[in-house]
Amino acid sequence: MSDSDAELRSRVVTGAIAAYRAGDFHSVGHVEIARAADLDVDDVRRAYPIWDLLVVAVMDRWNNGSRRALWSVAERDGVVAYLRARLQAGLDEPSLVRLRIALLSAASTPGHPAEGWFRAQYDHSFEDITLGLSRDVVAGREPEGTSPRHAAEQLVALYEGLQLQALLRDDTEVIGGFDRAVARLRVGWRSSATV
């Protein structure tokens, strides 16, 4: 791929992110992306002849970029603080949350062209959280004896559930709900560690 091709693809992805910020996932197409990127529709199609590859490129830059940028929080303050920061980022950028949730069905649809990529990304993120929790137990940020795998399942379910509720319910208090639920989870982790 030449530099000009890479620049075009980057510009298309930037335009796609802008289009998704301005509109619903299902209403964004080649025309909206071309308008946001100040390109011709043919340029968008030339850069990404397969729609699913464009969506993967958007998610790789937008969602994974956010995830990577916030991982330093996990390293410094632990996984709970990291997921809390990601929840706050989702409140600040609800269009990314809407896009991510809309694409979760692709990850679970056998035969979808991007199924493997979405599943691999999801698995990688889950394993990062599990590994981070292992470090948190060793560092004393989480109770000794906590099962990192089980704690990761609970925290990811809480994180995703609160994001979904925030999109569908006007009275959801995402950060406060997360803090209250984590306090209860830690009580359970402590008690199971002493059993």
Image: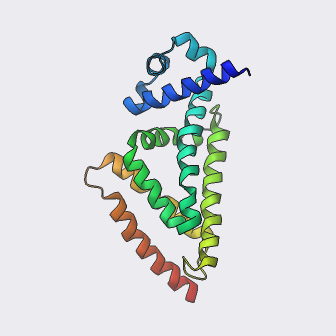
Residue at the (58%, 45%) spot, across then down? 64
Residue 132 in the figure: left or right of residue 170: right
Q: Identify the residue at the far left of this view.
A: 171
Q: Is residue 152 above or below residue 102?
A: below
Which image quadrant: the N terminus?
top right
Q: Identify the residue at the far front of this view.
A: 3
> Looking at the picture, how far across and down is residue 10, in whole percent?
59, 27
> Looking at the picture, how far across and down is residue 82, in whole percent?
51, 61
One can see residue 191 in this view: yes
Q: Identify the residue at the far bottom of this view.
A: 194
> Looking at the picture, how far across and down is residue 192, in whole percent?
54, 83
Residue at the (51%, 11%) spot, across then down? 40
Residue 32 in the figure: left or right of residue 124: left
Residue at the (40%, 54%) spot, across then down? 88
Residue 38 in the figure: left or right of residue 71: left
Residue 31 in the figure: left or right of residue 116: left
Viewer-side residue, 81 vs 53: 81
Which image quadrant: the C terminus?
bottom right
What colour scheme governs how the chains and residues are painted in the rendered image of this protein?
rainbow
